[in-house]
Image (tube, grey):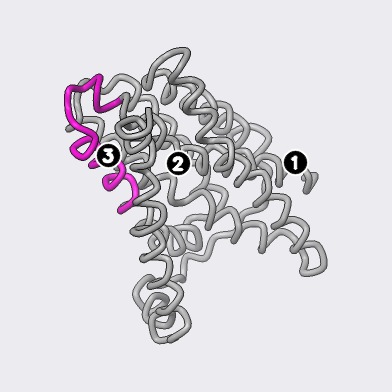
Amino acid sequence: MDKKKIILILGFAGFVAMADNWVVAPILPSIAQNLNVNVASAAIIITAYMIPFGLFQILYGFLAERFGKRQVITFSISMFTIATGLCAIAVGIPDLTVYRAITGMFAAAIMPVSLALIGDIFPMEERQAAIGSFMGISFLGQGLSMAIGGSIAYFLNWRGVFAVYAILAVISSILLFTIGKNIPSTKNKETKMLPSYIRILKNPSSVIIYTLILFEGIFIIGSFSFLGGFIKKYLI
């Protein structure tokens, strides 16, 4: 299979996942107002997304080795599509919270497993460029997320934002199920879950990195999500 197509297909899945990662921040005030809660109460949907998004990345390493990296990405983006569509029709904070938790659970697979798959497919001399291209496409979604989400919410509403993201996820799912089914993906049925994680946690560098990422999520990504509400309340 053409390696450029592999990068484009995986990159588009990453684009959708990373765009969704930040999409709630600009529309949180609108969600709160529409569902008759304050911004602080509505922020539970951010927590509900971020916790499984962080925790399940650890689990997907084992699942990708056991069942195949392409298979895990394809299944995850399909479930991500369903969960995002459900967010668009949520009737209150409780069910929206559940849907965002499910979304985060499956969005967690896209970036790490795609990077691992690229590592399997591309030889060392091509890997740096391949990863750079993939990350560039994926983080373009993150960079445009605020503008896309805010613009859609302005012309439609917050439900329209999730509907558009669900449509993008449908396109990504179709690409993975059709053209993407030819992406090479190996399985290792002998992979054991617990020993693999014990080896990682025995490495002090790994523990430091995971701790830093945890604090980044709490103090940077978490606090940034309230920026929309702060601007609306104090600056507009």
Q: Earlier in the sequence, mark 3 or mark 2?
A: 2
Q: Which residues are magenta?
A: 31-51
Q: Earlier in the sequence, mark 2 or mark 1?
A: 1
Q: Can you identify the residue that label 1 sits on? A: 5
Q: What's the magenta bit mostly, secondary-structure-wise?
A: helix
Q: Is residue 85 above or below residue 116?
A: above
> Looking at the rendering, which quadrant does residue 137 occupy?
top right
- Residue 202 marker: none
Residue 79 can be seen in this image: no
Q: Count residues near mark 1 (Cα–Cα under 10 Å), then give few for <14, some for 14-19, many for 20+.
A: few
- Secondary structure of residue under mark 2: helix
Q: Is residue 219 above or below residue 212?
A: above
Horizontally, is 145 left or right of 202 in the view?
right
Q: Can you identify the residue that label 2 sits on? A: 22
Q: Mark 3 and mark 2: span between their CA atoms?
A: 12 Å
- Secondary structure of residue under mark 3: helix
Q: Mark 3 and mark 1: span between their CA atoms?
A: 35 Å
Residue kind at label 1, given as amino acid type: Lys
Q: Position of residue 114 (x, y in %)?
A: 58, 53
- Residue 45 marker: 3
Does the residue at mark 3 contact the one at mark 2 (Cβ under 8 Å)? Answer: no
Q: Earlier in the sequence, mark 3 or mark 1?
A: 1
Residue kind at label 2, given as amino acid type: Trp
Task: For the C terminus, give its image quadrant.
Answer: top left
Q: Is residue 47 magenta?
A: yes
Horizontally, is 128 left or right of 22 in the view?
right
Residue kind at label 3, given as amino acid type: Ile
Q: Position of residue 77 (x, y in %)?
A: 48, 39
Task: For the N terminus, give its image quadrant.
Answer: top right
Q: Mark 2 and mark 1: span between their CA atoms?
A: 26 Å
